[in-house]
Amino acid sequence: METTKFEIADYLDSNEMIAEYLNTVLEEGNNDEIVTAIGHIAKAIGMTKIAEETGLSRPSLYKALAKGSKPQFSTILKVLKAVGGQIRVSPIAT
């Protein structure tokens, strides 16, 4: 029996799934996990499309969203906007 590598991007096939995935990572993840999740979302939508919408090159996007990278906040905002997301702040329940 042959196994294949699990690819989360294959399951991010709707705006609702993308939002749920990103919100979960934002709540529970660290910086690296958040950048990686945004990379998964960009791959699911298509790096070429994201590159066109952000004005960044595909190689720059792959580099910025690679594991262990430290992208500029402006890059994260551009990619989030391109994938149809936004950042919102809610008070933390105490």
Image: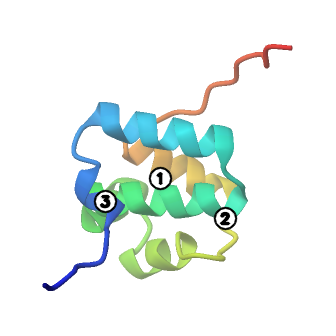
Q: Is residue 87 above or below residue 70?
A: above
Tell whether 53 sits left or right of 48: right
Image position, residue 41 (x, y; %):
38, 54
Where residue 78 appears, x then y in whole percent?
Answer: 51, 50
Q: Amino acid at mark 1?
A: Val
Q: Residue at x 26, y 52 (%)?
A: 11
Give the number of the disc on residue 32: 2
What amino acid type is highlighted by mark number 2? Asp
Element type at mark 2: helix
Q: Earlier along the polypeptide chain: callout 3 or callout 2?
A: 3
Disc 3 versus disc 1: nearer the observer:
3
Relative vertical location of residue 52 with respect to residue 70 in this rendering, above or below: above
60 left or right of 71 in image:
left
Nearer the camera: disc 1 or disc 2: 2
Q: Tell me the residue at 60%/54% (across/down).
A: 34
Please state which amino acid type lies under the numbered disc 3: Ala
Image quarter of residue 50: bottom left
Q: Residue furthest front?
A: 1
